[in-house]
Image: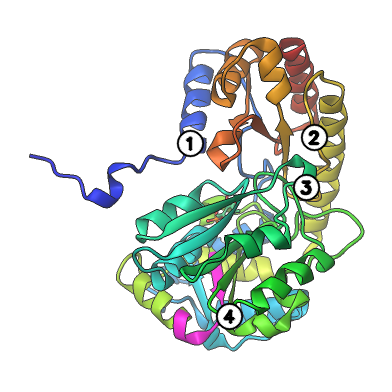
Amino acid sequence: QLQLADRVREMTASPTASLNARTTEMRAAGQDIIGMGTGELDFDTPAHIKDAAKAAIDQGLTKYTAVDGIPELKRAIVAKLDRENGLHYEVSQVLVSCGCKQAIYNLVQATINDGDEVLVPAPYWVSYPEMVKLAGGIPVIVSADIEQGFKLRPEQLQGAITDKTKLLLLNSPCNPTGAYYSLHELEALADVLRANPQVMIASDDIYEHMLWGSEPFVNILNACPELHERTFILNGVSKAYAMTGWRIGFAAGPEQVIKKMKAIQSQSTSNPTSIAQYAALAALQGDQSFVREVVTVLKQRHDCVLSRLARMTGVRCVPSSGTFYIFADVHRTMERLGVATDVALSELLIEKANVAVVPGSAFGAPGHIRLSFATSMENLETAMTRLAATLS
Ligand code: PLP
């Protein structure tokens, strides 16, 4: 008889994955579905990165590597953190993982005990609460609505901290909202964190480069270097270099914990794919013009989607500062159409408008939908016309 472990009984696959499956199914049935649900760029990985991977294969660099990554890549990550983020790490404080996701997973496994509380600002990335639960922790969801730009306020942070709080998961620019915390906002959160020394901080910087607006990217350590001893930087090459399939991410932080994260990785996946590591090395060390070009295109698409959404009755949005998502408040649209949930609304949109979006409840924010603009302008124009027709 099959016996599931208690800790996985309630667990389901990522809701964004089931939406992708439905899109694939409808497309296979010949329907013209425009995907605004995707979490990856519609650009190809740049040629110089692919060439580095091909060269690695030809040179026979296809064997196990050090569990925590090849030394060249770890040095390139240290250099990147110094050059782009003004953060200083030793190579021993860096771990290369199979995507940023595994880096976060390792961190949660390495730090969370049964009953520990982890603060997850909502709207959140779908995997955060599940990773916490899988480690025996309790995700404490702190909701930030559209009125506050979907950003956690310092008083909310203070109000959510208890003596069981172990970790805060911060993501800026944020999936799903595109919200970005300014230096000033991070300083205000850091003030609270300084007064609560038991709380560690995870800064998920995976959308660092997908940012427009006048301010350069900053994270909580730039705002408050004092938090260095209990902050972890999580990042990777997936989003910035259109490398989601290559599965290379990294963590940087206090060595004592990084060492244990490495031990977890050594007993689960071992090293990330050797070939992909050489590709990531080329991404970090090579020409960065791809990243700039992508941001210009994303900003144009964002402006188009935002202006079209703003004209739809009952849809409320705030501009995104980065990522390739817009998070729309559709409470009033649902009311007007007599649709009870955001899941039902998303189903209606895929069936009637043939546009795939992700329901906000997947991100802990019912009554919203996430629209991804990681698709061509032509597709976006058509999708927005179809959405307007269905939602009006
Ligand atoms: N963190 C956030 C906020 C994300 O949106 C994603 C991917 O969607 C990840 C981490 C994972 O990135 P990777 O593909 O490098 O594992």
How dense is the environment of label 2, judged by Cα within 10 Å: few (below 14), some, or many (20 and up)?
Answer: many
Q: Amino acid at mark 4?
A: Pro
Q: Position of residue 221 (x, y in %)?
A: 71, 76
Please check the rendered image and state whether residue 112 is part of the magenta-colored stretch, yes or no: no
Residue 15 circle label: 1
Q: Which residue is mark 2?
A: 317
Marks 1 and 2: which is nearer the front? 2
Tell me: residue 334, above or below residue 375: above
Q: Amino acid at mark 2?
A: Cys
Along the line of sight, the residue nearer the viewer: 264 or 157: 157
Label 2 beta carbon within 8 A of ligand 1: no
Image mark count: 4
Q: Residues at badges 2 and 4 in contact (C-beta under 8 Å)? A: no
Q: Amino acid at mark 1?
A: Pro
Q: Which residue is mark 3?
A: 148
Q: Position of residue 123 (x, y in %)?
A: 63, 45
Q: Which residue is mark 4?
A: 197
Tell me: residue 352, above or below residue 206: above
Indicate which quadrant contains ligand 1: bottom right
Q: Earlier in the sequence, mark 2 or mark 4?
A: 4
Quarter occupied by the N terminus = top left
Q: CA distance from mark 3 to mark 2?
A: 12 Å
Tell me: residue 80, above or below residue 312: below
Q: Residues at badges 3 and 2 in contact (C-beta under 8 Å)? A: no
